[in-house]
Every structure is written in C-alpha cells, then in structure tokens.
Image (cartoon, rainbow, N blue to C red):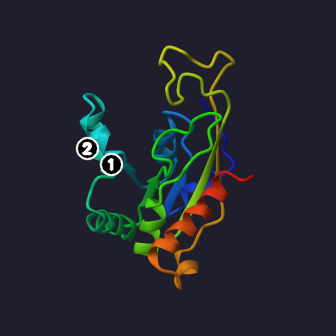
Amino acid sequence: VDISKEDRKKLKNLKSAIVVANHPSLLDVTLLMGILPQADCIVNAALFDKFIVRHVVRRLFVPNSMDFNELLDSCNRSLKAGNCLVVFPEGTRTKVGIKSVLHKGSARISLGTQYPVFPVSIETNDMRGLRKGDPFYRINKKGRYQYKFVLKDPILPESYRELSMPIAARKMTMEIYSSLFPA
C-alpha cells in the first residue's frame, strides 16, 4: 500500500472534528484512523455480531444502533476530549459504477454537537479484492494499492442554525455529498 503524503499533516493536526469519508475499500478505516491523532469510529452494529471482527470492534468502535440521544452523548464526550469522530456516511463500501447515497447521521451528529464536519475524499487506484462483494483471493495485479486522502473545507453546523433539524440535516448531507463526490 502506498499512501500519498499530501494532506497527511493536515489530518494529523485535526482535533475535535467529525471526519466523513467515502469508503472504496476494506482498508479505509484502518488507514484513516492510523493517520488521525485520536479517532473514534461509528460502525454498523451488525459488525458486533461477526465472529472474528466483533472482538476488535467492541473495543474500538461506537455502534450505530444506539438510541440517538445516547449516541449523541457518546460522540459529544469523544469530541470534547479532542478526538476525531470518523463516519462513513454511505453505511457500506462505495460500489463501483453506482451513485452513492449518504445517510444523514453525520450531519445530525454535527448539528447536535455543534462540531464541524471535515470531508475527506479517499482516492484510490484499482481496489480489486478490497471492494464491496469482491472475493478476498482476487487482488490488484497491477501493483500496489494507492491511496490519497484529500481533506476538504470544513462544513460548519452554525450555517444551518436557522433551519429545523430535519431540513438542516438533509441540506448538510447534500453539502457533504457535493464535497465527497464533486460533479
């Protein structure tokens, strides 16, 4: 794996931020959390039931199945401690050739905690073997996996202060989408 050093320094200096990213491969979580100084990650609650994965996930991650107020309190405590909260708003790995749909959870957390969202576009080469639905034995035969993490401008929750929560969450999610997947 080769990781571009372009925005690594900026990512290492982030504190108390909600980091949202696209999710092209199995390694995204590990690589992004390895770059950020202190990170918590919200993950699909179904991972807590997977035989091997559950032992790691229970120690390091926040399940997305919590009551929203409980989740918001947990996220707020983490962010107040200076941690970055990593969220993959697609809810699954990005599917090649299919337009992504984002969930509103990251926007709702930002609006509820008043911490900014920092979109990170993960650009990669051929992720064969690490994409959604790929068999594990198929690998990129063209060489090393290439990753580039591009930190975008922050999205500030106070920009949506005048709107009701449902409308603000929808509009903020659309702004996150435009940042992660520019036309």
Seen from the viewer's position, the closer of residues 170 and 82 is: 170
Please name whichever residue, 37 or 165, is drawn nearer the observer in this view of the structure. 165
Q: Is residue 16 visible?
A: no
Instruction: Locate the N terminus and report the quarter of the image it occupies.
Output: top right
How far apart are labels 1 and 2 at the CA level?
A: 6 Å
SS for tag 2?
A: helix
Judge the density around disc 1: few (<14), some (14-19), many (≥20) Cα neighbours within 10 Å: some
Residue at the bottom extreme, as displayed: 162
Residue at left 62%, top 43%? 99
Residue drawn at point x = 57 percent, y = 35 percent: 95
In this rendering, the count of numbered labels is 2
Task: Specify the farthest residue to the right.
Answer: 183
Looking at the rendered structure, the kind of residue marked 1 is Phe
Point out residue 43 in the picture as x, y percentages from the top left corner.
Answer: 37, 47
Residue 54 visible in the picture:
yes
Image x and y of residue 146, in percent: 65, 32
The residue carrying mark 1 is 61
**How busy is the neighbourhood of tag 2: few (under 14 within 10 Å), some, or many (20 plus)?**
some
Question: According to the image, label 2 marks what residue?
Answer: 58
**Residue shown at the point (33%, 67%) measured from the top left:** 72
Q: Quadrant of residue 112?
A: bottom left
Nearer to me, 7 or 128: 128
Residue 46 is labelled as none
Q: Secondary structure at mark 1?
A: strand
Horizontal side of 136 relative to 11 (left or right) equals left
Q: Where, by quadrant of the figure, is residue 55 drawn?
A: top left
The kind of residue tagged 2 is Arg
State if disc 2 and disc 1 touch (CB < 8 Å).
yes
Q: Position of residue 170 (x, y in %)?
A: 53, 66
Location of residue 53 in the rendering, given as x and y in whole percent from the top left corner: 30, 33
